[in-house]
Image: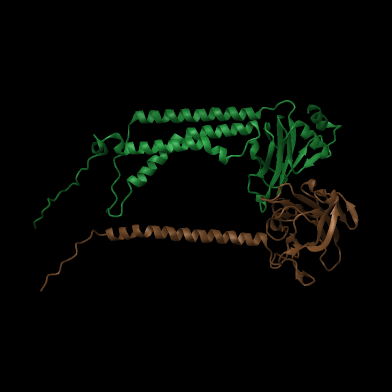
Chain colours: A brown, B green
Amino acid sequence: MAEETEAPEQPAGSGDATRRARSRPLGFAITLVIALIVFAGVGLLFHAQAYSSPAGTLVATDVGTSTVKGVALKHVTLHFNTYPDASGSVNGVPIHPGGNPAWPSYGPTNQYQVPAHALVTVTIRQYDSGGALNNAWFDKVRGTVGGTAIINGKVVTSINPNNVGHTFTVRGTPGTDPGFFVSVPLPLVPGDSQTDNGKYETIVFSFISGDKGLYAWNCEFPCGTSIASFGGPMNAYGYMSGFVHVV
Amino acid sequence: MSSDHPVVDEPPVLPQGDSIVAGRPFFSRPVGKIFIIWFLMTAVGVLIGIFAPHHLMPTFLSHEGTDVWRTMVLFTILAAPVAAVVYAVAAYSLIGWRHRGNQDDPPEDGPPLRGNSTVTAVWLATSSVLVLVLLAWGLTVYSAEEVSHPGTLQVDVTGQQWLWTFTYPGTGVETRSLVLPINRPVQFNVTSVDVTHGFWPAALGVQVDANPGVTTVIRATPDKLGNFTVRCSQLCGLYHSFMYAPGSVVTSAGFSRWLRSEGASTTTGQATALVKKQ
């Protein structure tokens, strides 16, 4: 009968230490992958919130060609509104799907698409009340064709800074023309009015779109909550801010 | 019961560091290896201090920006050997004295080093000199920027979520772009109408917070023509990343033309003075 040879006894704990050492790179790799997935997920979430809307993107309507200062430009139009709250719907289209019903909002969406280097004519129906601007600089019409807007059929270059409902202010973002800037003050409606009582201000203005890219717009009237009334809808995606996609 | 090994009551006394390395060449001893690492890291740090600012910092368009650039270069070069000491000791300790997988319990710490007055004195003196040099340099640069010069151009800067606006007092000019004449001292009177922002025309080498209800003053003298961007350096809300404004340094004549194109009143206040000085 052959004698069995016993394996030499290993010091207690040395095997565990070896296994731990070997498993470190794997653990590091798994941690790194999880971190990347979480990071990418958060990034995609923010991207989806910022650059898209549950209501979709409003694509400008092509209405032909117009001439501005002797230059023929493609002419498109956009129609959207501002509401005192995000509840309800207009012609069956929710103002702000899934939004906070107590917050003022642009509607039916906050994402607009226009062609590059085109004449864009915007018509806004403003249904909200308002008050005084933090900075009277925004009481003037800036960056539009002729530096004017038409409010209820009257051509204006500015409005009373104490009677502002909202502003529609567009600027370039990194990667686009930093000098691009359009800002139009929207006069208030005395007392909040919703879509069913028929009170609104009609503001029409035109601007020439810039290069292709993403342009940010927001309201510069303090219509939110918290500090300087720039919290709540002013600091959340989809209510008083959005993007103009120039394609 | 018998044993091949004698039973001892006390653990064997291990030889201490000096006796272990005594007689070995300097660069084969731990301190020599740490010295080599320190030397290489210092060289890398100095090279970074000399060359990195060209790539990491904007092209400065003002005296103050040039001062900032010089300060960054000097401070980086002076900090390189100090930082390298820390990194070299840490790197050698982590790699050379790490606990390897085939070892049992980690070795105990060596005896503490105390009472080396020479090392202490050299370290304190070196640190003091370095800190005093940095302090003197910083105060000199800062005090130069604090001096108000005659004929200074006043620009009121207003920050708000999420735009900058610039007013040229006495001219009636309010703009969203910051246009400055070359070789003319400028005083920025900075405030905010809502939350705290950071007025940061990086190419001018100055930065100051814009606080609501408070006007903060900062000065610069553009000395090169060019374009730059005014950014917000304080996280201020949803569109903080889009809170920037275009800026440019133009010739004196160009500045006058720009003021007129913006509808400046050339009959009153600063506008008259501005035009006369061109």
If the image is split into quadrants, where does the C terminus of chain B sit?
A: top right
Q: Is residue A66 above or below residue B209?
A: below
Q: Is residue B8 left or right of residue B46?
A: left
Q: Residue at x 36, y 43 (%)?
A: B92
- Please identify the residue farthest to the right as the structure is shown: A154
Image position, residue A230 (x, y; %): 71, 53
Image position, residue A166 (x, y; %): 79, 55
Viewer-nearest residue: A3 or A127: A3
Viewer-nearest residue: B83 or B263: B263
Viewer-nearest residue: B37 or A106: B37
Viewer-nearest residue: B189 or A210: A210
Q: Is residue B234 above or below residue B142?
A: below
- Please identify the residue farthest to the bottom as the structure is shown: A1
Image position, residue A158 (x, y; %): 85, 49
Count numbered badges in the picture.
0
Q: Can residue B243 be seen from the camera position used here?
A: yes
Q: Residue at x 28, y 48 (%)?
A: B107
Q: Can residue A190 be seen from the camera position used here?
A: no
Q: Residue at x 68, y 59 (%)?
A: A237
Q: Is residue B17 left or right of residue B133?
A: left
Image position, residue B52 (x, y; %): 53, 39
- Please identify the residue farthest to the top as the structure is shown: B150
If the image is split into quadrants, where does the N terminus of chain B sit?
A: bottom left
Q: Residue at x 17, y 66 (%)?
A: A6
Residue B96 falls in which quadrant of the image? Answer: top left
